[in-house]
Amino acid sequence: MAEDPIIEVSGLVTQFGRQVVHDHLNFSVRRGEIMGVVGGSGSGKSVLMRTIIGLMRPKAGSIKVFGEDVTRLPESRRQQLQRRWGVLFQDGALFSSLTVGQNIEVPLREHTRLSAQARSELAALKLALVGLPPDAAFKYPSEISGGMKKRAGLARALALDAEVLFLDEPTAALDARSEFEVF
């Protein structure tokens, strides 16, 4: 018997005013599957991701993640569920007032009780995982390239070893060669 879907979208309708973005969209994703959403600019890929993770409310339909309808959960339960996924936004969405290392530590501070040293060590490990040099942890987003921001955002998405990763344009701004240039 096939495992229940970890993401199940049923009858999803999203819109901005009169502009309908998704019209009764249905799909599911099972554990271990990789799903890619392809479409032109402005076709609703980012809106879909933001709706699934609860940043936007749909006009209609249901969105279940790990069997729970995220559109109907109380905020406290939704926050617990968010610990189980990592998100990489299009532009990395780093906090400009925090260093790269501090940005990676944000989900660790919000969802764990790890010591400052443990958070810092995990951030360094995640930086290495995405191919950034150790000294990138001490730089601010304004001091690094677009590709490095994207990698730092990915490191943050990986911080909690999430069960599901939502990646919005994960290869945008990345060069074919490694980006180890640090200013």
Image: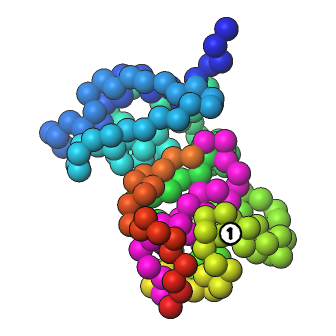
**Residue located at (42% from left, 44% from top):** 49
Q: Quadrant of residue 31?
A: top right
Residue annotated with mark 1: 128
x, y percent for residue 142: 45, 85
x, y percent for residue 81: 64, 42
| 180, 97: nearer the viewer | 180
| 33, 163: nearer the viewer | 33
Tell me, yes or no, if residue 109 can be seen here: no
Rendered view: 40 above or below 177: above
x, y percent for residue 183: 50, 91
Residue type, mark 1 in image: Ala
**Residue located at (49% from left, 24% from top):** 28
- In this view, the residue farthest toward the bottom is 183
In reply to whether residue 14 is colored magenta, the answer given is no
In reply to whether residue 162 is colored magenta, the answer given is yes
x, y percent for residue 43: 24, 43
Q: Residues within 10 Å of mark 1 (few under 14, many from 20)?
A: some
Q: Is residue 168 left or right of residue 75?
A: left
**Residue located at (42% from left, 38% from top):** 36
Rendered view: 52 above or below 3: below
| Stretch in magenta | 143-164
